[in-house]
Image (cartoon, helix red, strand yellow):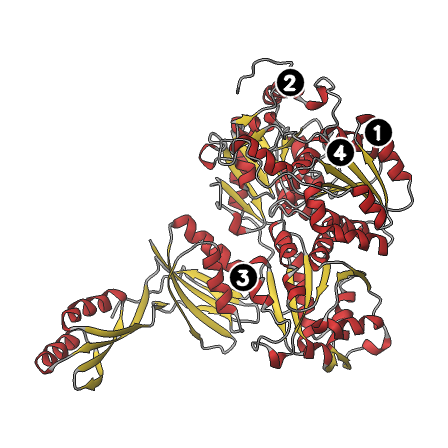
Amino acid sequence: MSEDTKSGKNMTGASILWECIEREGVKTVFGYPGGAILPAYDALKGSKIHHILVRHEQGATHMADGYARASGKVGVAVATSGPGATNMVTGIATAMLDSSPIVCITGQVGSKLIGSDAFQETDITGVTLPITKHNYLVTHASEVARTVREAFYVARSGRPGPVLIDITKDAQQTTCAFDYEAAKPQLPGYRPDLSPENKEYEQALELIHKAKRPVILAGHGIVISGAMHEVREFAEKAGIPVAMTLLGIGAFPAAHPLNLGMMGMHGEAWVNHTIQEADLLLAFGMRFDDRVTGNLKTYASNAKKIHIEIDPAEINKNVKVDVPLVGDLKEVLHELLPHVETIDRSEWLDFIDKLKGDAAVRDIQNLPDSGHLYAAHVINDLWRETREGETVVVTDVGQHQMWEAQYYKHEKARSLITSGGLGTMGFALPAAIGAKVARPEADVWVVVGDGGFQMTLCELATIVQEKLKVNIAIINNGFLGMVRQWQEFFYDRNYAATPLLNPDFAKLGEAYGIRSMTVSERSQVVPAVQAARKHDGPVLINFRVEQEDTVYPMVAAGASLHEMIRRPSKIVETAADE
Amino acid sequence: MLNTYVVYVENKPGVLTRVASLFRRRAFNIDSLTVGRTEKPEVSRMTITVDADRDQARRIEANLYKLVNVLLVENITNAPAIIRDLAMIKVAATHEARSHVLELASVFRARVVDVAPDSLTIEITGGEDKIDGLLEVLRPYGVLEMVRTGIVAMRRGKTVSQASTNGDVVSDLAAEDVSHSV
C-alpha cells in the first residue's frame, strides 16, 4: 500500500472507498458514472483499480455476478443514485437467488437532501431490502471503511449473496482520519459458520448405510463450498449415482460413470425416474426448487431425505427432510467421509442403466437428418470443438439454456454460468464479460437466444471497448422459444407475442466492430466455431435454427416428476409413460 | 397456533423495516409486533406474535437469524412467561351508566385515567384475554375509541435472555429455576 494511506491519514470517503475495495483484492470493477457517484469516480485516478465502463447498469451487476461465478471472488458493480441504482435491481435479484457474491456501490444524494425527493433520489436501500443479503446507507466518510469490510465479508461468507452500499455524495466528499485496522467489521448477529451435531451425523450415516437405492442431488452449494473433490470421493466410496441441478452442472464430472445428468423440469427422463424410485435422497447444497421437484406431493415419496445445507432457513422449506446437516458442505463431507462404508449397489445402478437405454433412441442426435439445423446440433458441435482446454459457457434463459444443459458436457466446476433461480433473460452477454475479466485465459462462449440477446446487446460495445475476446453464439429461432413451447403445450398453440422480427445480427455485430457470421446448415457449424476460436478478437455467430423446436423431456409446471412429456420418437413406437 | 418470539436486534435505523419486511416477503402473518429499548442502549427488543405451525415457526426463527442485525431469537411460546398488553378504552358514560362502568373497571383492576362529561377513559394492563374480557363487557355502553400496544413478553424466574453487540449471546432457556404466577 502507498505511504499516504498509513493509519490516521486524512482521506476523503471516496478515496477510502477505493482503498478498502483494493484491499479486498479487487482489481476490476464494472460501472457507470453519474452525479451522485462522481466524487468516487474522481478518486479513481488515485487507485490501481481498473474500471470497466458498461452501457447499462444492469449489465454492470451481471458482469460482477459473472465475475464472481467464474472466479469464486466477490464481483463489484458501481452506479449512481436514482435510475442508476434502480437499473441494478434485476442484476441484484439474479445474484440473490443464485447465491452469488457481489458488492454494489451506489451514489446517493447528499445526506441533507435525503427524503426531499431530490433530483435522482431513490430509496435504494429500501428498494433492494428484500433482494440483498444485506445493505447499507452510508452518510459519513468515517463509516466507509468498516462498511466496505463488512460488505465484502457478508457477501462471500456463509451462503453468499449480494450486498449493496449506498453512499451519500457528502460522505464521499468529506475527509476523515483513515485507519484500516481500526475499522474492523462489527457483526455481532451474523453467524455464517454453523455445523451439525454429532447425533445428526450418526443419523445420516445410518440412513446412508441402510439405503438400497440412494441418489445424490448435486447443487450449486458444491461449487460455492469448493467441495467437488469431496463429493466425488463420497459418491465413489459409497457407490451412489449423482444427479445435478442446473447450477450444480460441473460440480461432478459429466463423463464420470456415476454421473446421471440434470434433474428436474427438463432433466433427462432416467434422472427423474431415478429420483422417483429412490429410497434415499442426499441433497448436497441444493434447495429443492420447484423446477427440480415438480409436484411436491408426489416427489420422491418413498425416499428418506438427508439435506446438507449451509442456510438453516432452507431446511424443510419445500421438502420435509429426515436428517438436516446444517453447515458448510465441504466440512460436513469431511466429517462423514471416514465413516462411509463401501456398499455394492450394482443392482440399483443396473436399473438406472436400463432407464437410460430408452432415452437414447429418442435423442435428437440419433433421429434421421431432416436437413434442418437444430439448436441441439449447434450445442453438441460447440461442445466437441471446445471440450479440450478451459472453456466457460455462459447461457441466457430459455430453450437454448436447457439444450446447453443437456448437450454440453461439463467436466469442471465454474465452466457453466447461467441464471437459474431468477431466470433472467439478458444475463448471458454481460455475465460473460465478467467471466472473461475474471479468467482471461479461458475460452468464453456466450450461448444466447435471439430474445435475451436483444435485452442487453448494448454491452457489445463494452466488449469492443475493453478488447475482450468473447465468442457469441446466438441461437436464433425467431421466437421467444420457451414461451412459445409453453403456448404449444398449454395454450393451444396460440403464439401470442412470441414471434420476433429480428435485425440481421451479423450486420449488427459488424456495426459494433465485431467479426460476425451467419450459419444455417449443420455442416457450417464446426467451421464457424473453429474460425471464431482462431480469430484474435470477439466473434458473433448467428445460428439460424429450426423455428418451432421443443425441449424434451418436459415436466409441466405442477406435474409429478415422473410424468414427463417425452420427445415423440420415430424409432420407438411405444413407451411406458406415453 | 400463536407463537411468541422475543427478538433482540441491533438498535440501528431501518432494523424494524427489515424484520417487518421479512414477515411480509415470506408471507408470515404478524399478529402483533412491539419494539422498545432494553437495558443496553445498543440493543432493542421486539416481541412478535405470529400464527404459525411448528415447521413454519422454526423457519421464521431461521429466517430472522438470516438478518444480519438480529442478535438473538427465542421462541418462548412454550416457556413460562409473563405476557402483557396495555389498552386504553374510551367508553361512552352517561350519568346513569357511569357507576356501572366504574364498577366493571374495578372488577378488572383497570384504572380510570380520564373523565369527561360523557365519557370515561380506562387504562388496563394484562394478558390479551383479560383485556378482551373487559372490552366485551364495556361494549354495550358504547366503546368510542380504543388503542392497544400489542403484547410484550418476558420469561419468568431468574432466566435471562441477553444479547449484546460485543458478540456474546447468552440464553439459558432450559434453566429450571422458574417462578410461578403471582
Query: Which mark lies nearer to you, 4 or 1?
Result: 4
**What SS does tag 3 mark?**
loop
Give the residue number, with chain letter if any, for mark 3: B67
Give the residue number, with chain letter if any, for mark 2: A357
Disc 4/disc 2 C-alpha distance (Å): 31 Å
In the rendered image, residue B163, in percent from the top left (x then y), is placed at 49, 69
In the rendered image, residue A70, in percent from the top left (x then y), is placed at 75, 48
Query: Which mark lies nearer to you, 1 or 2?
Result: 1
Query: Which mark lies nearer to you, 4 or 2?
Result: 4
Residue A40 position (above or below residue A157): below
- In this rendering, do the residues under marks 4 and 2 share a single chain? yes
Give the residue number, with chain letter if any, for mark 4: A544
Task: Report the amino acid beneath label 4.
Answer: Arg
Give the label on residue A524, or none: 1
Is residue B172 toward the left or the right of residue A223 in the image?
left
Q: What's the chain of the residue with tag 3?
A: B
Disc 3/disc 2 C-alpha distance (Å): 48 Å
